[in-house]
């Protein structure tokens, strides 16, 4: 169980399902790791070990307290994932956001525009259900659903297990749709090359300031649902300004995945990678 957020119950199973597959392939994946404070941008995600320090006692002996990187196992697996991706020229993206920001719709529209020019594979992360994987399956690209149970994020081991079940072509785009959450996923390196944070204008302009860890550890910020701006007191430029206060290196795309407005900038950038 994660001590910070309480996610993941001891002995709870994480399941990996392809569309049409029976829900009987659970794998034990208890979450026993702790969460540290969020790390700084950019990759690689580094978690420095505190220096050992002496603690004198009255009787003259010295006690050494050695800090251990509590995300060390995840980071090691993430590096293994990244090495595998690089060996096969796979570019991995970690899509993160709060629930309802439009991640799945963005994926559907991105695939529709680029799948004839670039192979895609998708990993869908949700606590329960096959709903998002079933949506992506209709696009014709390989997809697997990872159901995390009560865990609020994907981790590097989950990605490794999911990749084992996917037939990922060389030079493909691997799109990982993380569990909807603006806190815990920011702490877990999955082995991705790009972390893409998606924020919709319906969420308000202050999300980067309220959840700085997610924006600080991301490379790309997509501001979505701009088709709804006439009905909202929201301003994409204010969202951008707030995000840049947290991370001045962010690259932005302002778009509506539903209507297609602004999608060209995003897909052209992908094609240029």
Image (cartoon, rainbow, N blue to C red):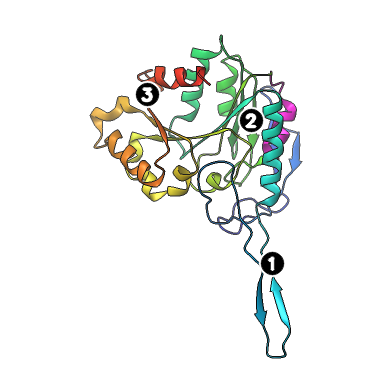
Depth order, front residue of 111/150: 111
For residue 65, which quarter of the picture?
A: bottom right
In the image, which is nearer the foreground, mark 3 or mark 1?
Answer: 1
Q: Main secondary structure of the magenta part?
A: helix
Determine which residue is flagged by label 2.
Answer: 145
For label 2, the SS is strand
Residue 181, position as x, y percentages in the image = 50, 43
In terms of sequence position, does the residue under pointer 1 or pointer 2 come before the other? Answer: 1
Q: Residue furthest bottom?
A: 59
Compute the Cα span from label 1 to label 2.
39 Å
Residue found 65% across the figure and 52% down from its top: 71
Crowd band around label 2 with a 10 angstrom C-alpha radius: few (<14), some (14–19), many (20+): many
Circle 1 Cα neighbour tier, 10 Å, few/some/many (<14 / 14–19 / ≥20): few
In primary-sequence order, the first of circles 3 and 1 is: 1
Q: Which residues are magenta?
A: 157-169
Picture layout, residue 118 above or below residue 71: above
- Residue 162 part of the magenta-drawn span: yes
Identity of the residue drawn at 33% across and 37% down: 240
Give the secondary structure at mark 1: loop
Q: Element under label 3? A: loop
Q: Which residue is mark 3?
A: 256
Q: Nearer the viewer, mark 1 or mark 2?
A: 1
Write down the residue under mark 1.
66
């Amino acid at each position: 169980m994660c001590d910070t957020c309480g996610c993941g119950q001891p002995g709870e199973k994480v399941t990996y399902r392809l569309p049409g597959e029976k829900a009987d392939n659970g794998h034990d994946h208890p979450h026993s790791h702790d969460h540290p404070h969020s790390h700084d941008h950019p990759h690689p995600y580094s978690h420095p070990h505190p220096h050992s320090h002496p603690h004198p006692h009255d009787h003259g002996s010295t006690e050494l307290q050695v800090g251990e990187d509590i995300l060390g196992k995840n980071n090691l697996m993430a590096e293994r994932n990244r090495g595998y991706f690089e060996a096969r020229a796979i570019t991995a993206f970690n899509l993160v956001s709060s629930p309802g920001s439009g991640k799945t719709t963005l994926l559907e529209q991105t695939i529709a525009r680029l799948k004839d020019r670039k192979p895609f594979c998708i990993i869908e992360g949700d606590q329960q259900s096959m709903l998002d994987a079933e949506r992506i399956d209709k696009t014709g690209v390989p997809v697997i659903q990872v159901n995390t149970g009560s865990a609020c994020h994907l981790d590097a081991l989950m990605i490794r297990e999911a990749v084992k079940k996917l037939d990922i072509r060389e030079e493909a785009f691997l799109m990982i749709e993380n569990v909807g959450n603006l806190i815990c996923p920011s702490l877990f390196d999955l082995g991705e090359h790009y972390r893409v944070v998606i924020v919709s204008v319906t969420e308000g302009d202050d999300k980067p300031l309220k959840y700085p860890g997610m924006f600080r550890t991301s490379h790309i910020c997509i501001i979505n649902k701009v088709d709804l701006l006439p009905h909202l007191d929201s301003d994409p430029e204010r969202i951008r300004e707030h995000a840049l206060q947290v991370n001045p290196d962010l690259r932005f795309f302002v778009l509506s995945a539903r209507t297609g407005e602004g999608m060209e900038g995003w897909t052209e950038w992908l094609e240029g990678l």
